Image: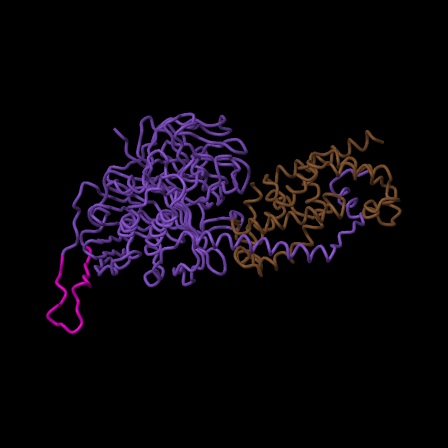
Amino acid sequence: MVAIMAKPVEQTAYDDLVVLAKTQADALGRLYELYYDRIFRFCVHRLFNRTTAEDVTSSVFLTVARTMRDFKGRTEQDFRSWIYTIAANQANAHIRKTMRRKRLMGNVTGRRWAEDENVDDLAPRDDPEWSRLDWPAVYAAIQELKPEHQTVLTLRFFENMDYDEIGRVVHARPATIRVMLHRTLRHLQEVLRSDS
Amino acid sequence: MFETEHDFRKLVSGLKIDVEPNPAHRERLHRQMLQVFKQQGVSSLKSEVSRGSPTLPTSHFKLPISYLAVAAVLVIAATLGVWSLVGRGPATFHQVRLATQRMPWLYAVVSRYQAGEVHTERHWYNFAAQKAYAVMDDGSLVSWDFAGSKKLAYSPRLKALTISDLWAPGVGTGSTENLQGVFAVFAAQDDVGGSTAQYDGKAMESFAIEKAESGLSVGGKAVSLLRATAFADPQTKRFVAASIEYQGSGGILAREEWVLSYPQSGPASLGDLGLPASTAVDDRTRQRIGTPSDEPTPISTPAPTSGFRLAPLEIRLPKPMFVGTPQDARTPNLEQPRGSPRPPFLAPVGTKNVALGKPVSSSEEPVIGSLSAITDGDKEATDGSFVELSPGPQYVTIDLQERCEIYAVLVWHYHQWPRTYLDVVVQVSDDRTFKTGVKTIFNNDTNDTLGLGAGRDLSYVETYEGKLLEGKGTQGRYVRLFSNGNTHDDLNHYIEVEVYGRPLH
């Protein structure tokens, strides 16, 4: 909260678009074009499966369509925080409800990245330094985290958001996010060490 | 293995994840989404048509804030009207209308947010006499006499009072008349109801409208969408607040928050609102083109006529410690610096600082200083004059030792350097634990960090003038002030808090 408020609201060229999108379908369509890739990418990083990510992306944008007229924000920054919040909640709800991700992660950890199509998406680069890393173990450890912590991890390291923006998405103070990330990474280290 | 956040970032960047979207899915979802959006729009439109919408005036609202404020009253009235036409839901509108109309006075404190500035107005409406009065934050005074079709406006800059004809009668031409007019039009409607919504921590009856092309303008820009929500207390059956949003094509043009109360008395003339006795009067209602015999006749300045009188608060200010508003004190939702001294704040005669020397308690023991410094009258930003509380959310509570009617709370957190205190919330209650009967008079905790409800007030930079918060005539014994660190550090500070009010005997 402290850092959130210490940072001025950024004005972007799309602020007007956000306001128009509350009443005009064309404007909403343009917002969709701006955000589809980002939300889909977030969902892929969050769920590790393209098909599931498409499902969740669909429910995110349909939720936006249903509730856009009541959206209280007025800037693109408001909209960005809002839509990522929806995406994070939808992804978490999906994970909790179906536990499908657990199975997918089981596939990943069980088959490594040789056999499964999804795993192939996650294969590291052909770099000797990276080839030594045990990716499935890392993912298995991530899987054990609370969904909210996974969300923060994804927003930070895959979406490259700063603490302020993550705070706006998950409704927490930047300082809290910083501490949460620190503890999450430490927890991951401990899990990986104990596994090894 | 990674050791630091940087290592983990490198680890992640080594991933080759296919995030290229499927064009077919993108296209299909695009169509679905717009279809859903349009269906939502159609259902909203049907709902709007089924209610019917009163016509708002177009010609009279071209800016002066008072006109917009009057328009806002019209919106509240229109809200009542729209809901009365709906004719469904619980039969509460009838009770609300009668209870509101029955009161001798309606007092409204209007906070208007526009282009980073906040303006405050105070209005009194006398339903029986068909008169209304307003005090603007620049010292301007206005009165509307709807029965006599006259408007009086005092400009402190010109030091002159102008009397002019009021707009032609009819719905949309004046605040009091509007309210009465709408009440009369819909007097036969007994089965009107709204929905239930939370306001100030209580469940209230809520009445809402959304109207496109209102015919209003703000700052020269047309209002394309006007949203209004009015809240009524289910116990007293009277309106207690309203929120109005003016949207233009480029976004939100202005927003108003109305807090309504029902005092037993009010002004009977502009003289009661502090109109200087020596004010020059320009009576334009007497001038007629082409009739030389109708020269304006000098008239006297209206004199105080009732026991209700307002006078400027006498506030002793400490020594200024800095000039301007540095960037590092800026926050989102920040009130723009006024750039000039604060205008006089008018309060009923007899209003004083009822917090002076009163006991203070806090959420935690102070890190530095004594709590008694908060009400000792010393507002200087020097070492030893302030109290420092721990980081994070903290509060202090002032016990006024008797119930008071509060018109203003003046707070100096710390003004040695410019900074903005975060999540500032000020509440009044008769319960020392603040579990019951809590009334919030200021709240800029916009994301509800404190869990007291999301506020909509603006953040502000600390200055030697302190922050004057409208008390809105709130009654209570205890005043509690929350904060959650500041833009400089996570600590909380108080130099002085003054509570201007009158004891209720």
Front in this rendered view, residue B290 or B332: B290
Magenta segment's dominant SS is loop
Which quarter of the image is occupied by the N terminus of chain B?
Answer: top right
Is B217 above or below relative to B97?
Answer: below
* Colour scheme: by chain
Give left or right: position of B307 versus B37: left
Which residue is at 66% across, 37% downward? A148
Where is residue B83 drawn, in percent x and y? 38, 47
Front in this rendered view, residue A149 or B153: A149
Where is residue B118 drawn, in percent x and y? 41, 50
Residue furthest bottom as drawn: B290
Where is residue B295 drawn, in percent x and y? 13, 67
Indicate yes or no whether the magenta region holds residue A63.
Answer: no
Which quarter of the image is occupied by the C terminus of chain B?
Answer: top left
Indicate yes or no whether the magenta region holds residue B287.
Answer: yes
Which residue is at 27% across, 51% downward? B181
Is B176 above or below relative to B436?
Answer: below
Palette colour of chain B: purple
Please report the bounds of the magenta region as a residue range. B279-299
Which residue is at 39% across, 61% downward? B215
Q: Quadrant of residue B371?
A: top left
Is residue A48 visible in the rendered image? The answer is yes
Is residue B117 visible in the rendered image? The answer is no
Front in this rendered view, residue B152 or A174: B152
Give left or right: position of B278 versus A57: left
Q: How many marks?
A: 0
Where is residue B152 drawn, in percent x and y? 23, 56
Q: Quadrant of residue B475?
A: top left
Palette colour of chain A: brown
